[in-house]
Image (tube, coloured by chain):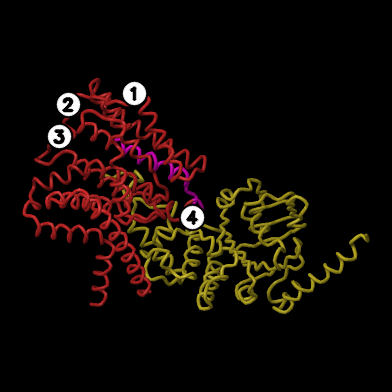
């Protein structure tokens, strides 16, 4: 009996972000009768698709022990390329952004892996670098694509009544979860973040693992770029900047540790939804914009504290079990 | 019978410093060697030469009677030589569980659609085999699904030693294996070394604790200033003798060096 209660406590503590989502949803449902409607949830999730997908990629790099702050510029670059290619060829507009994302990810990865640059600093640099390059290439204006055709459907179509971006987000969340929990590359990503010397010592090419993680993130940002481009039709070079804080908040909120080696991609998805629900809730409750920001900040701090608390409790449970 | 490892007249210079001075030794199959000496006696250098980290300046290094020339940690490992580090520069991954650590870099995979794609990890099989191995070696760990960071120092040390068995080690080099663990756990780690011996795996134990050396070692080597000054079977010596060798030798050398010093 004691064992069962301990297990239950462990389960609750290790999935605290899910508990946060449930509590928040219940609270919202009590406060607004518009909250638990299919239309509202479709709206919430649809808005989350782009930052949610990007957060999955960023989380991978953070779990591997790095960080990539250049995702906002990468996202804009991929979206702009998609918008530019889209009137010419549908398939090119899909492959192009993915290739660009992978290339930019590889560039970041090589800086970190081959030249030993600190990922925080070097990707802060490439964030400006990519953005500046985008400004120069586009002349600073909007890259306009068509507002119709199959490409337009990516962000605006529905499959079995569910908006396609939501399906894409769930699909990518499932794929990255599978990668991190079921494959050796996923295991090595965690190992790299936790103790890369240990990984190297085991005879694994740790640098290749790290580089692959950056490329993988680039690919994922490429997908987000396609969705963003399809939704907007025209892309400005600064389009990615507004996702900067949301994505980082979602990654940290999910319990992914900046020290590396810890986190779950499923929780990243849930954390993104939590942020979406907070946003949506404040709109439904007609909270003034200035207070919205304040509430978001408070929620963020509370979540981090709660996260620290649960991590500690979990460790204590483990230790006392021995 | 050819010894597993044979060193002949090994010298290693770091600039003008002679870290290993004309050392010759043999290690038989299943033999446990205790390597002792004061600080800066050249124990680490000798270990690192055997582990392929350092290339000797001159001398011959033979494994199974064949010259070992590759001198890289990887080729030494391929020859079955594994090094277990102290806890502080631990080679384990704290955030992974015990089974994942034991199989790190040597994962087992499930068949995907009936094919060996090496895509999906077979965690169940790895956990089962880890359980069997740890049980065989008498290592007591709460669960193989426990993260390594939640294990005690001694348990972590045991897991790193157990891993060498997975890597088909023939010689395990242990650098101060008991330096940072409790007395109770020390006993367990030493037992583990004897278990390896029973499996025909040789080991070299570097330790400052004479108790550790005398419980496990078959033969004891004393190093001083890069020279091997003693190579004796455990039965033919005593703890006092060995300690004297380490200390007295030091005094001798001091007097000799003062004699050799040119007068100003």
Give yes or no for contact between labels 1 and 4 (Cβ–Cβ under 8 Å).
no
Magenta-tinted stretch: A200-222
Query: In this picture, is B138 found above or below A220?
Result: below
Q: Chain of mark 4?
A: A
What residue does disc 1 label? A139
Name the residue tied to disc 3. Answer: A156
Residue A309 position, x and y percent, is 32, 66
**Which one is in front in this view, the residue at disc 2 or the one at disc 4?**
2
Whether residue B221 is in magenta: the answer is: no
Which comes before the other along the chain, label 2 or label 4? 2
Q: On residue A198, which mark appears? A: 4
Circle 4 Cα neighbour tier, 10 Å, few/some/many (<14 / 14–19 / ≥20): many
Specify few, some or many for label 3: CA neighbours under 10 Å numbering under 14, 14-19, or 20 or more. Answer: some
Image colour assigned to chain A? red
Position of A311 compared to A145: left or right?
right
CA separation, marks 2 and 3? 10 Å
Cα separation, mark 1 vs mark 3, equals: 28 Å
* Front disc: 1 or 2: 1
Establish whether labels 1 and 2 are both on one chain.
yes
Q: In the figure, is residue A238 to the left or right of A49?
A: right
Label 1: chain letter: A
Q: Earlier in the sequence, mark 1 or mark 2?
A: 1
Label 2: chain letter: A
Whole-number angstrom distance, CA of label 3 to CA of label 4: 46 Å
User: Does the stretch in magenta take in A214?
Assistant: yes
Q: CA distance from mark 1 to mark 2?
A: 22 Å
Q: Are marks 1 and 2 in contact (CB under 8 Å)?
A: no
The residue nearer to you, when weighing A97 against B125, is A97
């Amino acid at each position: 009996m004691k064992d069962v209660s301990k297990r239950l406590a462990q389960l609750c503590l290790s999935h605290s972000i899910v508990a946060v989502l449930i509590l928040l949803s219940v609270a919202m449902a009590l406060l607004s009768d518009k909250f638990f409607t299919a239309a509202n949830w479709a709206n919430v999730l649809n808005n989350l698709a782009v930052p949610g997908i990007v957060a999955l990629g960023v989380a991978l790099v953070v779990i591997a022990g790095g960080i990539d702050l250049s995702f906002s510029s990468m996202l804009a670059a991929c979206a702009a390329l998609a918008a530019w290619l889209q009137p010419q060829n549908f398939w090119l507009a899909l492959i192009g952004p993915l290739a660009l994302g992978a290339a930019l990810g590889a560039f970041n990865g090589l800086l970190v892996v081959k030249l030993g640059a600190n990922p925080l600093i070097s990707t802060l640099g490439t964030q400006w670098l990519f953005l500046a390059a985008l400004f120069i290439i586009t002349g600073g204006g909007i890259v306009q694509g068509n507002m119709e055709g199959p490409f337009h459907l990516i962000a605006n179509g529905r499959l079995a009544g569910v908006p396609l971006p939501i399906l894409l987000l769930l699909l990518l969340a499932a794929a990255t979860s599978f990668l991190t929990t079921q494959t050796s590359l996923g295991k090595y990503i965690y190992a790299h973040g936790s103790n890369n010397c240990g990984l190297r010592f085991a005879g694994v090419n740790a640098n290749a693992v790290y580089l692959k993680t950056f490329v993988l993130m680039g690919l994922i940002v490429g997908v987000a770029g396609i969705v963003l481009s399809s939704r907007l039709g025209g892309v400005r070079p600064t389009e990615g900047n507004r996702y900067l804080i949301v994505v980082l908040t979602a990654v940290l909120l999910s319990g992914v540790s900046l020290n590396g080696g810890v986190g779950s991609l499923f929780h990243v998805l849930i954390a993104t939804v939590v942020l979406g629900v907070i946003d949506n809730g404040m709109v439904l409750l007609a909270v003034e914009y200035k207070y919205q920001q304040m509430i978001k900040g408070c929620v963020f701090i509370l979540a981090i504290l709660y996260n620290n608390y649960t991590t500690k409790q979990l460790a204590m449970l483990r230790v006392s079990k021995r | 019978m050819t010894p597993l490892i044979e060193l002949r007249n090994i010298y290693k210079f770091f600039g003008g410093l002679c870290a290993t001075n004309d050392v010759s030794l043999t290690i038989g199959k299943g033999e446990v060697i205790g390597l002792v000496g004061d600080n800066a006696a050249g124990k680490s250098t000798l270990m690192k030469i055997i582990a392929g980290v350092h290339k000797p300046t001159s001398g011959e290094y033979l494994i199974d009677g064949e010259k070992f020339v590759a001198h890289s940690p990887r080729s030494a490992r391929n020859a079955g030589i594994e090094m277990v580090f102290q806890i502080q520069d631990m080679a384990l991954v704290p955030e992974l569980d015990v089974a994942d650590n034991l199989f790190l870099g040597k994962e087992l995979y499930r068949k995907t659609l009936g094919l060996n794609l090496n895509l999906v990890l077979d965690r169940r099989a790895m956990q089962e085999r880890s359980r069997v191995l740890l049980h065989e070696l008498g290592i007591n760990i709460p669960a193989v699904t426990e993260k390594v960071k939640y294990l005690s120092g001694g348990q972590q040390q045991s897991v790193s030693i157990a891993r060498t068995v997975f890597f088909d080690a023939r010689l395990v080099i242990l650098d101060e294996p008991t330096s940072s663990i409790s007395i109770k756990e020390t006993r367990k780690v030493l037992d583990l070394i004897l278990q390896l011996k029973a499996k025909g795996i040789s080991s070299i134990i570097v330790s400052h604790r004479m108790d550790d050396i005398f419980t496990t070692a078959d033969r004891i080597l004393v190093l001083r200033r890069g020279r091997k000054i003693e190579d004796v079977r455990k039965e033919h010596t005593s703890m006092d003798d060995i300690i004297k060798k380490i200390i007295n030798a030091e005094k001798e050398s001091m007097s000799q060096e003062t004699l050799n010093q040119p007068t100003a």
